[in-house]
Image (cartoon, rainbow, N blue to C red):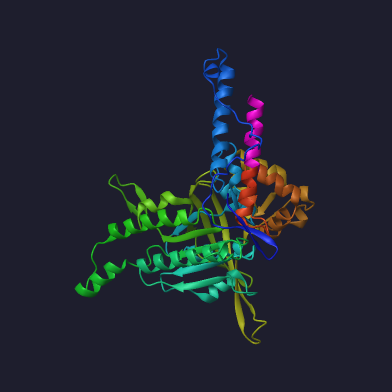
Amino acid sequence: MAKKAAVNGTHVLEDVVPVRKKKRRGEAREPSFKLTRKMMLDPDPVKRRAAHTAFMLENARQFNREFPDESAGVSGLMGAQTIGIYVPSIVMQYQLQCNVLPLSRLYAVVGKEGSFKSAFATEIGRWFSKYNGWGTVFEAESKWSDKFSRSIQGYDYPSLTVIGCYSQDDWQRKMQHEIRKLTRAMGGYNGKPGHGRYVPYLFVLDSLSGRDAAETMERIEKKGSPTRAFSEEARKNTQYFRKITADIAKEPMSILVVNHLKEGKDERGFTERRKPGGFHVGFNVSVEWQMDRLGRRRIVGDETLMDLSIKCYKNALGDTSRSVPVSVHWRYDPDPDHPGELRQVTYFDWYEALPRLIFMLAEEGTMGKDAIKATGLVKVNNNSCYSPALGFNSTKAMSFQEMGGKISQNKELSKRLLEIFQVQKHRPLLPLVDYRVQRAGIQRELDRELSRQIELLK
């Protein structure tokens, strides 16, 4: 079994090859289930089915005993193994149909130029920072704006490391190096214990098609003109992401790839989505978001706003193609650290997005109408509403932002909305608990549940 090493009075799991535990002489044998010929030929179909199910459950339980660092289960129970960082927005929980963003996964955000792809990637990094986590951006476009990024993260402390990359080979090599280095630091190396897997990490590639492969750049240097090398670069990306997703499969890490989106026409004249970097990269992605700008920027008071649409084109966590509206706001406030100067403040207004989403869904079907009934929302115009159910009549209409805040801070109403939106609950990453320890605890729960179900079927 995986051994434990004491670190500062706590325990973390070391990276060791799991070994089957040998039964000692005189030790009581663990109860097990064996499928017999008599059970398989039982004339009662219900009993035959129960016997086959018990055998399948026993198989999964024995696998967990043989390989304690792995997890086996059956459909209906495997969802318990999903651990992620809590999504701090009802709107995004609705879109993902999940209350957490699972760790150990690959994600992608795509969009046309100027669609706030990098800003959204930084926003997700902000979610990680709420767990005292941090991220690394592999900057492959030479367009990184430190001030803009900091205006989204906040100014309390830096939570992103930015590493410049100058070719496809360069970002792949550097990302693999950083993941390997962090994994060793967390789990230990050469017999020395690591600091443990207590906080999550996000690796952002900005962007997938920002740099050519080294061979392509060399050919341009020699010939003075580019050549078609897209297939070779796509192949490298496919192989790389197959490898790197295996490397993070048991780690409190996630990778977010930013990519450009181009629309073209297929042979039949239909519009198709074209993403550089290789089609097969999408096979490893759990969620792919598409960002789109809606109209032009607008000014409200001292803030500038840009309306966006965020759509899930792929979602392994729930319903695909859920789309949500959100506005990005930015303004300039006095800089407390530098008197006489201003600093930018940028935020995704998830509060404002909530009433917009509810009214949008109400035009589409039952889910939105149920949300209107639960919240009692009545629209006044495109940016204000009231709710008698929440104690605000037509004389006390308020902005979508204010109303969204009232709804989000009401625990009972938030819970009801998540039920209406069919949001599935999974386990948030626990503070001060090692990620591997939490996974091991879930595995023990799974093993007990398998045992319980076997007993019921005997």
Query: In screen coordinates, is 447 left or right of 295?
Result: right
Q: Is residue 128 above or below residue 40?
A: below
Q: In the image as oriented, which residue stretches furthest toward the bottom?
A: 340
> What is the x, y in percent for residue 310?
52, 55
- Residue at the (38%, 67%) spot, across then down: 210
The front one of 222 and 194 is 194
Q: Is residue 439 above or below residue 216?
A: above
Which residue in the rendered view is the most extreme toward the front? 25
Q: Position of residue 285 (x, y in %)?
A: 46, 52
Closer to the camera in the image, 408 or 19 = 19
Q: Relative to 129, is 104 on the left or the right?
A: left
Whether residue 356 is visible, yes or no, is: no
Q: List the single residue furthest toward the top.
A: 43
314 w.r.t. 398: above or below: above
In the picture, measured across the screen, residue 365 lies left or right of residue 290, that is right
Q: Is 451 covered by the magenta stretch?
A: yes
Q: Which residue appears at 66% of the width and 35% of the height?
A: 28
Residue positioned most to the left: 223
Question: Quarter holding the C terminus?
Answer: top right
Magenta stretch: includes residue 80: no
Q: Please state the horizontal and vertical placement of residue 172, each as a whole percent of the image.
A: 40, 64
User: Where's residue 273, x and y in %?
Assistant: 38, 52
Q: Is residue 312 visible?
A: yes
**SS majority, magenta:** helix
Instruction: Specify the segment rendered in magenta.
Output: 445-458
